[in-house]
Amino acid sequence: MTTDWGEKSTADLMSRYVSKEMGYGVPKEGWRICLAHEFKEKRKPFQAKDVSLSNVLEHVGLGIRYLKWWYKKTQVEKKAPFIDMFGAQPLRQIYGAPLGGIGGGTITRGWRGEFCRWQLNPGMYHYKTVTANQFTVCLRRGGQTVYQQVLSVERPPTLQGWNWGYCGEYAFYHALYPRAWTVYHLPGQNVTLTCRQISPVIPHDYQDSSLPVAVFVWDIENKNDYALDVSIMFTMVNGSGHKDDKCGGHWNEPFHLEKEGEAVSGVLLHHCPTVNPYTLCIAAREQPDREVSHQTAFSPKGTCSSLWSDLITDGRLDSPTGSSPPTSKGEKVAAALAVSCSVPAQSRNTQEFCLAWDMPKITFGSREREHLRRYTRYFGTKGDVSPSLSHYTLSHYSQWEKRIDEWQRPILQDSSLPSWYKSALFNELYFVVDGGTVWTELPEDADVSGGVRSEDGGLPAQPAVVKEYGRFAYLEGQEYRMYNTYDVHFYASFALIMLWPKLALSVQYDIAGSVVNQEPTERLHLMSGRYSPVKAKNVVPHDVGDPDDEPWQRVNAYLIHDTADWKDLNLKFVLQVYRDYHLTQDSQYLRDMWPICQAVMESELKFDLDGDGLIENSGYADQTYDGWTVTGPSAYCGGLWLASLCAMCMMARLVDNEEKYRWYRDILDRGSAAFDKLLWNGKYYNYDSSGRDLSNSVMSDQCAGHWFLRASGLGEGDYQAFPKEKIQSALKSVFDLNVMSFAGGQMGAVNGMRPEGVPDRSSVQSDEVWIGVVYGLAATMIHEGMREEGMRTAEGCYRTVWERLGMAFQTPEAYCEKGIYRSLAYMRPLSVWAMQLALDTSKKD
């Protein structure tokens, strides 16, 4: 079952690279692309016009109600809708690894080196390439400049006094998140530059991983028989390409900080809008044989030839003292920093730069509350810590790299794992940082319990893990702007629980506090057209809010459906509680969550309409597949229900509640029998039990409940909900039909497939491939001893997204076989870490 597409597609991305230079210290594994590469396939985002006529007719009411809501939101309130069906982001095949740690805001660099995606205001993205943000190299020999070049393949209409148009055929980019390397061979100069980009994203670290910083280490290889003086200049605009850049009042100042035997110099760029002001900082490490110089302020428009001339004259900048005057309205300002050093013949030297941004206090869209970012616990809240941040970063990044190496090395050196998988595993982690992520301190007056205390079946007001490790939230997707969307977090949460388990538990406490709470205010739900409460009691919320409103205070930004009707959210809460306990062995967490789990399970029992121990669906199955109509018990929700009962049996034993154990055991035994009787067809579990024409469609995610049991150390012996032979038969059916009979077996698993081998096109979602679901399916296969099939299934998604469609560092929720994709930069593909858990578990077994 092995394929050769891996080698071919990687070679395609590098086919235009003409140099033999491979840079300094660039690892073998990762995602590699020549800067001259052009992706041939151009896809379009799914929008309202892509809905089929049959689906339009079925959902005409929803369409009219959405249109009215969209108009009010955009034209009257002048706000961005949480999902914009008329303004999806076009595909820009340009993104590379983001800069920064977790929860402090992000700046994404493209793989060609541009600074092009910004999330400094929490959860709110804008996509603007800032032309003047560049690195420039200057080579001097015998006191004369022999070469000066902006390290960019672009030829922009502005800044024409600079030497643009570097030949991309002499450079390549290599990403192995949280690091990336760009190798530039300078044509005709016999010099190779390797820029190594490092962000402090370190598993099980809850301090340095929160820092809003990144490092650029430049290794300069001089392969000539004579010495060269080499200067690298870093230019940065005060702002992010947003209209605020021209609002006036911004100013820059140079700084120098020396402590503990280390010195750094740079420029602070104070950005002063009325909401969420911040300071950008470009800095460099001072060392005896390197000279750091700066230009405090220049105007990034026109030809900008004076800055170019300043560098070309002697490889240094003028370094004026004092701060720049505040900008006038309509004016932009930028700064430059240069480091110069000598590189002997046939030798190498290094330069180190840092980019930091300090926005310690944030407000969300409603402006109701002020929140402190996590890093302020260590660096302070006054907005004046950029020099300290850059000093700490430049003196500690080598320790970060050591820890990153120690974490990644065992996987990278495992010869039994294919190269594409190693790239997927680490590079998909970008979303933990670049998912509009916020990580804040818990305010002293905060109460996460929902007002129901421990003694009444609730939680402590300030659980120890939340108090110590803060609050964490990430978006469903950069285009689906809802924090901690719970049905999707179910899949993505594997990355958190395996790498930052305290953050995973913190999310669970926030969700649990919302469960016991209720919000009786009625609002219109767009699907049904009915008014119903925003949040019912003992129901898991869809999400914890919109960053353009007030997250944590107002949950359920999602107003398409009434989430009180969903079956899967409560079940996913129970399954995550037990899985998290299994992986952390945190008994206090289990004790705190046990009463919440009982409450949500009892609220689910109302859906057991005929008392057979199996919950039923009516209308829309669940929050995950909310476009796919279901009637009666279904493979997906029914399977999650049985798995949750299994987990409840185990938890009842752990808390010494034999009575509850017997109660859940009885429901599980009856439910399992009913599930088999109603859904098993001899080869796989039918999509639902309605008996309608499409009820026997093959759903790729039909074993999701079993997957979570296996990930939790259950699924066998006394804690088995599904017969092993039936699970393996179902997985084989999915592999044969949804994977190998779809797109030549090279695009992963389609959500729904008819038994005759054609995709189920009955809904918007049934003929899509969901990358995060496919990674979960692959993990299930690995748990069941089908490692080769699991790897083949997941490989199709990785190759499609990263190598064919140019969606690196913006993995979407979905794509179809041809033409369209949906929701770029989505949370669910973090489920690739479930594959690693499955591999780790199978090794132990």
Image: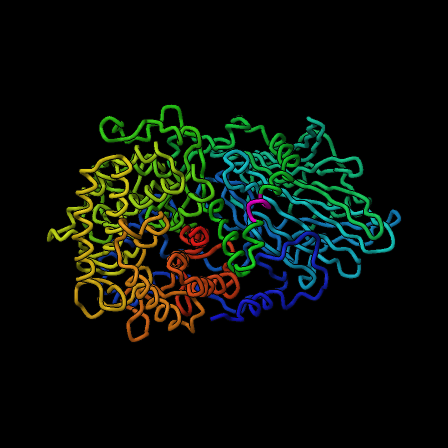
Residue depicted at 18% across the width and 52% down the height: 669
SS assignment for the magenta stretch, majority? helix
Report the magenta residues as a range.
404-408
In the picture, measured across the screen, residue 263 lies left or right of residue 92, that is right
Residue 137, given in percent of the width and then of the height, sits at 74, 50
Whether residue 332 is visible to the viewer of this picture, yes or no, is: no
Residue extending furthest toward the right: 142
* Colour basis: rainbow
Whether residue 120 is visible to the viewer of this picture, yes or no, is: yes
Residue extending furthest toward the left: 610
In the picture, measured across the screen, residue 839 lies left or right of residue 38, that is left
Above or below, 838 against 448 in this view is below
Residue depicted at 62% across the width and 65% down the height: 14
Residue 174, given in percent of the width and then of the height, sits at 61, 56
Residue extending furthest toward the top: 444
In the picture, measured across the screen, residue 408 lies left or right of residue 353, that is left
Above or below, 689 against 552 in this view is below
In the picture, measured across the screen, residue 319 lies left or right of residue 739, that is right
User: Is 318 part of what is drawn in magenta?
Assistant: no
Which residue is at the front of the view, 431 or 245? 431
The image quarter containing residue 225 is bottom right
Residue depicted at 29% across the width and 75% down the height: 756
Which residue is at the front of the view, 790 or 512? 790
Q: Give the number of callouts.
A: 0
Residue 83, given in percent of the width and then of the height, sits at 36, 51
Which residue is at the front of the view, 806 or 428? 428
Residue 350, given in percent of the width and then of the height, sits at 74, 44
